[in-house]
Amino acid sequence: MTLDVEVPDPPSLRGPQSRGEYDAIDTTDQEPTDDYRREELRGVLGEGAWRDAFEEWAEHTLLTDAEFGTVRELGLLDRFDLYWVPSDDEVGYRAPTLSADEREAFDDPDGIEAELDSLGRVLSEVLENDYLLRDEDEFGFFADDYTGEEEFEG
C-alpha cells in the first residue's frame, strides 16, 4: 500500500533525554556525554534526508491516509528523536509511543506504533547509507569527536 500524502516537515529533534533513557543504550559507570549531534542531524534532515526517507517509507507503510492524518494531528512525527550513538558509530532513533488517550484514536494502536518504528528505522538507514557517508581514512561519521578506545600500539 502506498501512502498518498504530502511530505510533512521533519521532526525538530528536541531531545534531550539522558542516554540511559534509551532502551538500546547500555550505560556504564561513566557519566555519558550529551553530544547527540542533533544539530547536524537536523541539518541533514532538512537537506533532503527526511524527504527521501519519508517517501521510501510511504511506499511500503500499511497506514491509511486517514490514520496518517491522525498521526499528524496528534503531533507524533515531531516526537521522533534521532541521535548519534558514538559507541556504535551509528544513528539511533526513538519512535514515539502512544499514550492511553492517543491509543483510543486508532483501531490498531499497536500497528500504528509498529509503522512509526518502521519510519524510524528507514530514517536511520537513509541517514547512515546516503547522507552521512564514512571516509575510508577516518572512523565514523563525526571522526573529529571519536571517543572510543585508542588503537593499541605495541
Image (cartoon, rainbow, N blue to C red):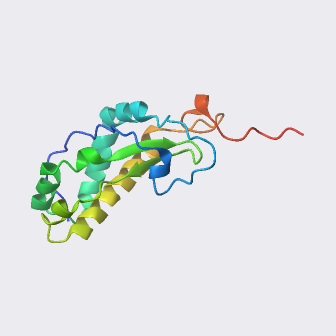
User: In the image, is residue 17 above or below residue 94?
Assistant: above
How far across and how far down the image is residue 150, in percent?
74, 38
Point out the residue furthest to the right here: 154
Point out the residue furthest to the left here: 66
Residue in view at x 19 percent, y 43 percent: 8
Quadrant for the N terminus in the image? bottom left
Q: Is residue 148 left or right of residue 17?
A: right
Quadrant for the C terminus in the image? top right
Looking at this view, is 70 or 143 the one in front?
70
User: In the image, is residue 53 above or below residue 24?
Assistant: above
Residue in view at x 63 percent, y 47 percent: 29
User: In the image, is residue 25 above or below residue 9?
Assistant: below
Q: Quadrant of residue 46?
A: top left
Point out the residue furthest to the top here: 144
How far across and how far down the image is residue 37, in percent?
46, 34
Number of numbered discs present? 0
Looking at this view, is 141 or 12 the one in front?
12
Q: Quadrant of residue 127?
A: top left
Residue in view at x 29 percent, y 55 percent: 57
How far across and how far down the image is residue 103, in percent?
19, 65
How far across and how far down the image is residue 54, in percent?
27, 49
Residue in view at x 59 percent, y 35 percent: 135
Looking at this view, is 17 or 126 the one in front?
17
